[in-house]
């Protein structure tokens, strides 16, 4: 019997068991660790049934294993096609495509991706002395929202020039992108130091929201004496329009009594349903119906008008709170019940 017929006479699991016995325990243990559970069970059963391997079977198994490994004249198959075939056999066609797509996406390098880690003001400062075409190339490759933040920081004439070039530049070679990117990386390495945003007026407002009303007043009063503009900016962050849902019904009714119906209709146009209900549930049925009608009749309005109406309502709420006519439950110690 030839080596080939000897090998063919064995089932897959029995052939695998014979190979493991031939290789010895150290090498076989490494192979066993990589087998899936269902294959491991079948091979283990054959191992128990095959206490020894004769020399003919051993040589046949090694010959087949060698032929399988080196049948391509020393060049083993690889590349995307091989990976697709291998993953398809291992996980099924759909799962294989999903896994390989994920690998492709992870390998893709997005041009100027490093710009996302830089503050827009810093980024604009670094780009401001570059040629408008260079700036246009950079911004065109960034997420539109991030590109807009950087564009807003540029001087007005530069904004127009960059915008025009973004619109007119439809194609650019990868080589040109690489040159611009490499030059920008070198420039950044010499002028940008990594910083972490840990402060600002918004974080301060969030802290003051938790210190209790007495401490909040003391801090803001002292801050106003030193920098009234800064104190006003902090106050704006401390209570936003969506925070109206924090008001209890008594405070809400007090606020509504002071409000202009047109301001409410404007302010509630983009509001969430829970926030609208906060208003409607603290009004008479007739007043709520009139407000709904006013909202439906006002037609299209500019977002600036909506924001101004919302700010007037916020200002009123802050005024009523400062005069102790209402309170806002911010979750601080002074807001807890005892």
Image: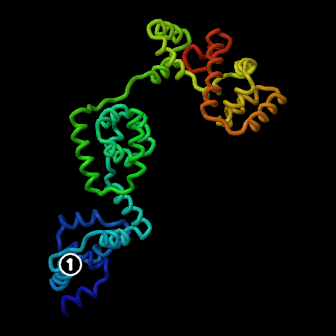
Q: Residue 249 location, x and y as percent?
A: 72, 22
Q: Nearer the viewer, residue 80 or 15?
A: 80
Q: Is residue 146 among the parts visible in the rendering? A: no
Residue 35 versus residue 198: which sits nearer the camera? 198
Label 1 crowd (10 A; few <14 / some 14-19 / many >=20) = some
Tell me the SS state at disc 1: helix
Residue 16: quarter of image: bottom left
* Residue name at image x 21 percent, y 67 percent: 28
Nearer the observer, 98 or 310: 310
Q: Is residue 262 visible?
A: yes
In the displayed structure, 241 sits above or below 181; it is above
Q: Which residue is mark 1?
A: 65
Up/down of 256 relative to 139, above or below: above
**Left or right placement of residue 98 versus residue 22 in this view:** right
Q: Is 62 positioned to the left or the right of 194 in the image?
A: left
Question: Looking at the figure, which quarter contains the N terminus?
Answer: bottom left
Q: Position of residue 29 (x, y in %)?
A: 23, 64
Answer with the quarter of the image where residue 13 lies.
Answer: bottom left
Task: Tell me if residue 316 comes above or below residue 169 in the rendering.
Answer: above
């Amino acid at each position: 019997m030839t080596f080939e017929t000897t090998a063919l006479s064995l089932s897959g699991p029995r052939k695998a068991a014979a190979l493991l016995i031939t290789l010895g325990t150290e090498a076989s243990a490494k192979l066993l660790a990589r087998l899936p559970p269902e294959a491991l069970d079948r091979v283990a059963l054959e191992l128990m049934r095959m206490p020894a391997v004769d020399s003919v079977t051993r040589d046949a198994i090694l010959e087949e294993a060698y032929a399988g490994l080196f049948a391509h004249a020393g060049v083993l198959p690889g590349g995307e096609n091989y990976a697709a075939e291998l993953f398809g056999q291992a996980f099924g066609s759909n799962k294989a495509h999903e896994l390989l797509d994920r690998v492709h996406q992870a390998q893709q390098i997005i041009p100027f991706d490093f710009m996302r880690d830089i503050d827009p003001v810093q980024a604009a400062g670094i780009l401001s002395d570059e040629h408008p075409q260079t700036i246009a190339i950079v911004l065109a490759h960034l997420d539109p929202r991030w590109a807009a933040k950087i564009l807003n920081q540029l001087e007005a004439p530069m904004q127009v020039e960059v915008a025009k070039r973004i619109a007119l530049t439809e194609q650019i070679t990868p080589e040109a992108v690489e040159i611009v990117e490499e030059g920008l990386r070198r420039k950044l390495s010499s002028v940008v130091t990594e910083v972490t945003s840990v402060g600002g007026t918004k974080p301060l407002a969030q802290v003051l929201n938790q210190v209790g009303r007495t401490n909040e007043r003391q801090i803001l009063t002292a801050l106003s004496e030193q920098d009234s503009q800064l104190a006003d900016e902090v106050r704006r962050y401390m209570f936003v329009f969506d925070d109206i849902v924090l008001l209890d019904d008594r405070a809400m009714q007090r606020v509504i009594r002071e409000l202009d119906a047109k301001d409410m209709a404007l302010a509630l146009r983009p509001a969430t349903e829970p926030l609208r209900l906060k208003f409607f549930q603290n009004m008479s049925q007739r007043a709520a119906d009139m407000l709904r009608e006013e909202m439906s009749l006002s037609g299209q309005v500019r977002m600036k008008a909506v924001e101004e109406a919302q700010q007037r309502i916020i200002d009123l709420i802050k005024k009523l709170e400062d005069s102790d006519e209402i309170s806002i439950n911010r979750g601080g110690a002074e807001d807890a019940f005892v």
